[in-house]
């Protein structure tokens, strides 16, 4: 279904990896670690792309530089999106791992939330401020570790990766605000 939606609406998803949290020794800690693995991986990949761009002193208008910036943009957007604390996204599982028992019980009502509700919230722009906040957090962390990434502090036109061709979902606008090129 996610692949079909990608071709029709320009937005799709993959099948979630099944995890049996009951097999983990410490379920709360395990839930946080398993759920944050993808987010951490996306953040590290974005950092690596920007680090390579800086390390190799690539020309900002070169193809390799553009590909690395696009790769960084995609990974920052994916990490920020997955941090949204709505089921079935990883952010909800991380929140549940830190939340007290009473909150987890009341929050469990939302666990069956359909992915189409998230798409509707994206379409209406309701999640844009949340995603922007998470993107700002991720980019701030990257800037902390990589103080002067080439191209991030300039007033050049924005890089558009060509993956999200529609501003309908707000994704392009978010990418432009996070990683100016």
Image (cartoon, rainbow, N blue to C red):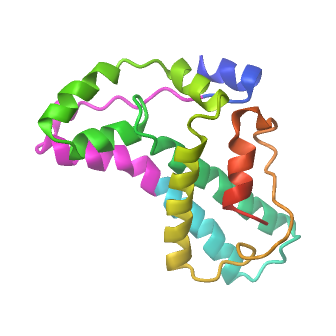
Q: Nearer the viewer, residue 65 or 115?
A: 115
Q: Residue at x 74, y 45 (%)?
A: 172
Q: Is residue 49 above or below residue 10?
A: below
Report x, y in % for residue 175: 70, 52
Report x, y in % for residue 125: 64, 34
Q: Does the image show residue 49?
A: yes
Q: Nearer the viewer, residue 7 or 170?
A: 170
When asked about the image quadrant of residue 126, the answer is: top right
Q: Is residue 160 above or below residue 95?
A: below
Q: Does the image show residue 111?
A: no
Q: Nearer the viewer, residue 15 or 176?
A: 176
Q: Nearer the viewer, residue 130 or 158?
A: 130
Left or right: residue 148 versus residue 27 is: right
When asked about the image quadrant of residue 97, the answer is: top left
Q: Is residue 128 above or below residue 105?
A: below
Q: Main secondary structure of the magenta part?
A: helix
Q: Residue at x 76, y 32 (%)?
A: 168
Q: Is residue 105 above or below residue 23?
A: above
Report x, y in % for residue 132: 58, 51
Q: How many marks?
A: 0
Write down the region rendered in magenta: 13-40
Report x, y in % for residue 43: 51, 59
Q: Residue at x 71, y 72 (%)?
A: 152
The magenta stretch spans residue 41 = no
When asked about the image quadrant of residue 106, the answer is: top left
């Amino acid at each position: 279904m996610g692949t079909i939606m990608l071709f029709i609406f320009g937005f799709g998803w993959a099948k979630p990896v099944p995890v049996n949290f009951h097999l983990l020794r410490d379920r709360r800690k395990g839930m946080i670690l398993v759920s944050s693995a993808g987010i951490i991986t996306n953040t590290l990949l974005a950092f690596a792309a920007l680090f390579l761009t800086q390390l190799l002193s690539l020309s900002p208008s070169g193809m390799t530089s553009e590909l690395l910036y696009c790769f960084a943009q995609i990974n920052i957007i994916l990490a920020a999106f997955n941090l949204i604390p709505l089921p079935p996204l990883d952010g909800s599982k991380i929140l549940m791992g830190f939340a007290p028992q009473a909150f987890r019980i009341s929050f469990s009502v939302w666990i069956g939330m359909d992915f189409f509700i998230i798409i509707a919230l994206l379409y209406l722009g309701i999640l844009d401020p949340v995603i922007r906040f998470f993107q700002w957090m991720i980019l701030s962390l990257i800037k902390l570790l990589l103080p002067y990434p080439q191209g991030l502090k300039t007033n050049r036109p924005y890089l558009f990766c060509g993956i999200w061709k529609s501003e309908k979902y707000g994704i392009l606008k978010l990418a432009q605000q996070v990683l100016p090129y």
